[in-house]
Amino acid sequence: MRDRVRFTVLGPVRAWRDTAEVPLGPPQQRAVLAALLLGEGAQVPVHQLVDAVWGANAPGSAVGSVRTYVHRLRRLLEARLIRSVGDGYLAEVDEDALDLAVFRKLVARAERARARGGTEEASAALHDALALWQGTALAGIRGAYAEAQRTRLTKLRLSALEARLAAGLELGAHAEAAAELADLVAAHPFDERFREMQMLALYRSGRQAAALATYGEARRLLAEELGVDPGPALRAMHERILRADDGLLPRAGEGPLARTARGPLARTDEGTPVRSAPEHEPTAGTEPEPLAGRAEALAP
């Protein structure tokens, strides 16, 4: 029976054969593997692998070095996992053997559940998706390519986090959401969506004054740091809280955020909220649990 190989990129770039971790070699070799895994089944040209390792400072021997790293990775893992395709390589990894692929699948499940009104199912799927993160994505990989990929992956994480908090508000976890959003606002002080959700969570927790104070803090910060006023959504939330709008309170049989907020999955790979601050990374965790159990739970 062939050994199962699995990978993580939502944290340090690591690989396991069954339960034994595979030593992946020097950072340059890990960078090549990371670029192949982030291709998610697509061919990655050699020049892109060179860029992933050295950026604009690639030596003349870069192409040969990349081919050497690929050869070593094939020996460490399994030759079948990295195929030569045209002028490049392709990592052929089972969908449930890469944490990023499992993350995407769980988020997609949450979106489908939300669309049919399954808020509890969506919340559970998003909790599982976010639990796959083990600190900073691609930890230990340096360079402009890795940094750009970290930014892209961070947007995916924030989108899922926002969706989970929105689901929590719909399920009545207002006090819990307010506490978590306080930390998120501190980490992302210019992200108006988190401010808006914090105000709603505080208001639903019976803390109208605190909700209004949150708006005042946002207005001062935006004026002092960026010379702008809060956006229309944040202003609208402020006005509704000022007049104690009953529409902000949850009602039986109706999802409150459908009336009070933008869709929770507004962020995409290509988009991010206006005036977002740099990512505040979670604390690195311990070795992630095997991905197979999560993937099996995803079966329709």
Image: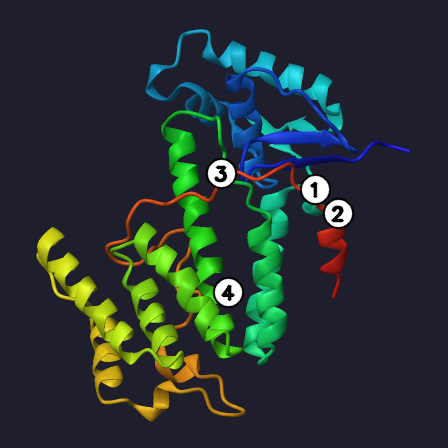
Residue 78 appears in view:
yes
Of all residues shown, which one is farthest toward the top?
Answer: 61
- Residue type pointed to by label 2: Ala
Circles 2 and 1, Cβ within 8 Å, touching? The answer is: yes
Q: Which residue is mark 3?
A: 137
* Dot 1: element: helix
Looking at the rendered image, the disc whose residue lies closer to the viewer, 1 or 3, is 3
Looking at the image, is 38 positioned above or below residue 269? above
Cα separation, mark 1 vs mark 3, equals 17 Å
- Residue type pointed to by label 3: Ala
Q: Earlier in the sequence, mark 1 or mark 4?
A: 1
Q: Which residue is mark 1?
A: 97
- Residue type pointed to by label 1: Ala
Of all residues shown, which one is farthest toward the right?
Answer: 1
Q: Which residue is mark 2?
A: 292
Q: Earlier in the sequence, mark 4 or mark 3?
A: 3
* Dot 3: element: loop
The image shows residue 106 at horizontal and vertical percentages of 61, 58
Q: Which residue is mark 4?
A: 164
Tell me which colouring the rendered structure shows. rainbow
Cα separation, mark 2 vs mark 3, equals 20 Å
Looking at the image, is 75 positioned above or below residue 34? above
Q: Give the residue drawn at x 57%, y 34%.
A: 43
Q: Give the residue drawn at x 45%, y 87%.
A: 250
* Dot 4: element: helix
The image shows residue 93 at horizontal and vertical percentages of 69, 38
> From the viewer's perspective, is 67 left or right of 223?
right
Q: Give the residue drawn at x 51%, y 72%.
A: 167
Q: Quick one: label 2, few (<14), some, or many (20+) residues within 10 Å? A: some
- Residue type pointed to by label 4: Arg
Circles 4 and 3, Cβ within 8 Å, touching? The answer is: no
